[in-house]
């Protein structure tokens, strides 16, 4: 089984050396919100997911 959405986002964020706060603020959310997304506690809506993927340089093929 592949990585979860949260795992994919976390790996991309850490590869770019960005903090949760930096990524969260770009898409209009807090670092705690992004933490909950990365741990699978919440699922972002499609527009926000698209923004996250854009910031992190991910595509649909990357599970975004």
Image (spheres, rainbow, N blue to C red):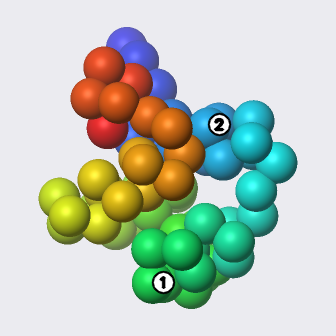
Q: Residue furthest left?
A: 46
Q: Vertically, is 62 above or below 7? A: above
- 58 left or right of 21 in image: left
Q: Vertically, is 12 above or below 47? A: above
Q: What separation in Å lies between label 2 and label 1 (alpha carbons)?
A: 19 Å
Q: Vertically, is 47 above or below 2? A: below
- 58 left or right of 34 in image: left
Residue plotted at (66% across, 47% down): 13
Label 1: element kind: loop
Q: Quadrant of the C terminus?
A: top left
Q: Residue furthest top?
A: 1
Residue plotted at (42% across, 49% down): 54
- Residue 28 makes an appearance in the image: yes
Give the mark, 2 or 1, whose residue is nearer the N terminus.
Answer: 2
Q: Position of residue 25 (x, y in %)?
A: 58, 80
Q: Position of residue 55 (x, y in %)?
A: 51, 53
Q: Are marks 2 and 1 in contact (CB under 8 Å)?
A: no
Q: Position of residue 34 (x, y in %)?
A: 53, 69
User: Residue 27, located in which quarter of the rendered image?
Assistant: bottom left
Label 2: element kind: helix
Tag on residue 11?
2
Q: Vertically, is 38 above or below 58? A: below
The residue labelled by disc 1 is: 29
Residue plotted at (36% across, 60% down): 51
- 10 left or right of 29 in image: right
Residue plotted at (41% across, 47% down): 53
Label 2: how many Cα within 10 Å (few below 14, some 14–19, many 20+) = some
Q: Position of residue 7 (x, y in %)?
A: 54, 39
Tag on residue 20?
none
């Amino acid at each position: 089984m592949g990585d979860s959405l949260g795992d994919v986002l976390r790996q991309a964020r850490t590869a770019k050396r960005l903090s949760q706060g930096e990524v969260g603020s770009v898409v209009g959310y807090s670092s705690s919100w992004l933490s909950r997304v990365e741990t699978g506690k919440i699922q972002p809506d499609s527009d926000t997911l698209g923004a996250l993927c854009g910031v992190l340089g991910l595509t649909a093929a990357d599970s975004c």
